[in-house]
Image (spheres, rainbow, N blue to C red):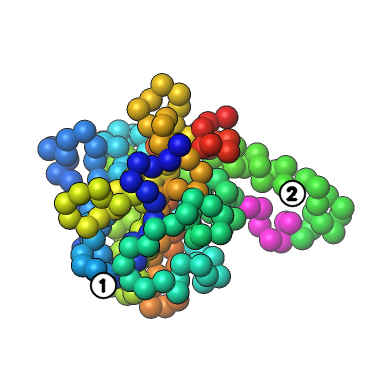
Amino acid sequence: MSLSDGYGVAIGTFVSFTRDNPDSYGNYYHGILKIKTLDGEYTCAIDVDTPNTSVGVEYKIISLIPSDLHVISPLSNGYHELFSNATSGAIDYIRSAYLVPKLPDSLRKWMRYFFMGHLISLIEHLMLRRGYGWKSNTGDKTLNELESILNTGNVTKIYVFGEPFSSGDLGVHNIHQNQGDPSGTSWWSENGIWQDGATIIEKSDGTITAFINKFTSQSYITDGSGHPV
């Protein structure tokens, strides 16, 4: 089971960021990020449920280092299809080492020094299972967090992970967690691992920031098929 129209990453430079009109957004509410690529302008629809629901969406803002992007950073601007596995450059909120919660390095070192290294993986698994680091907010306020990163004026490159538009303009959607949806929902059939959406922003000062988002109905832990456990 996986996304119907494939999965990949659109790479380009920042053009604009807007959002659906809260009074006429339809069934879903999106931040609309536009990036310029060699193929043309991509419209990237970042889904955050509804404008004012206080517990509908969760997000994380994570600082990365260049080696985290060693697979995708050499790719040219444009859209690139990615295999849903651990080596293609695909993203998985639950399995990508640079996205999952970890104990501070100083604490990990201390625990190993006192022969408690076996507890590190157990504690970090519990942190993952309990949703450590995720913040809940309204759709609008969640998009405000992303907008504050984008509108600093020194963005040099943007990577947007998700599912390509099947028709019409160039674009990417399903830019959110794409696994962990509960049984009985219309998204159950699209659950899958290594196919999560994300927005990663590089700046001229060398900083790299990942903005990831999910719905509160989606599980923090999934099985090998992307279904909640």
| Type of amino acid under label 2 | Ile
Left or right of 209, for residue 116: right
Q: Which mark is residue 120?
A: 2
Pointer 2 with pointer 1, Cβ within 8 A: no
Left or right of 108, for residue 43: left
Which residue is at a point 59% across and 55% down the rendered structure image?
Answer: 97
Q: Quadrant of the N terminus?
A: top left
In the picture shown, does residue 98 fall above or below 176?
Answer: below
In the picture shown, does residue 197 fall above or below 22?
Answer: below
Residue matched to label 1: 38
- In the image, 56 versus 45, the foreground residue is 45
Q: Tell me how far mark 2 sits from mark 1, CA to CA.
A: 44 Å
In the picture shown, does residue 197 fall above or below 75?
Answer: above
Q: Quadrant of the C terminus?
A: top right
**Residue stretch rendered in magenta on the structure:** 102-108
The location of residue 95, given as percent across then percent down, is 57, 49
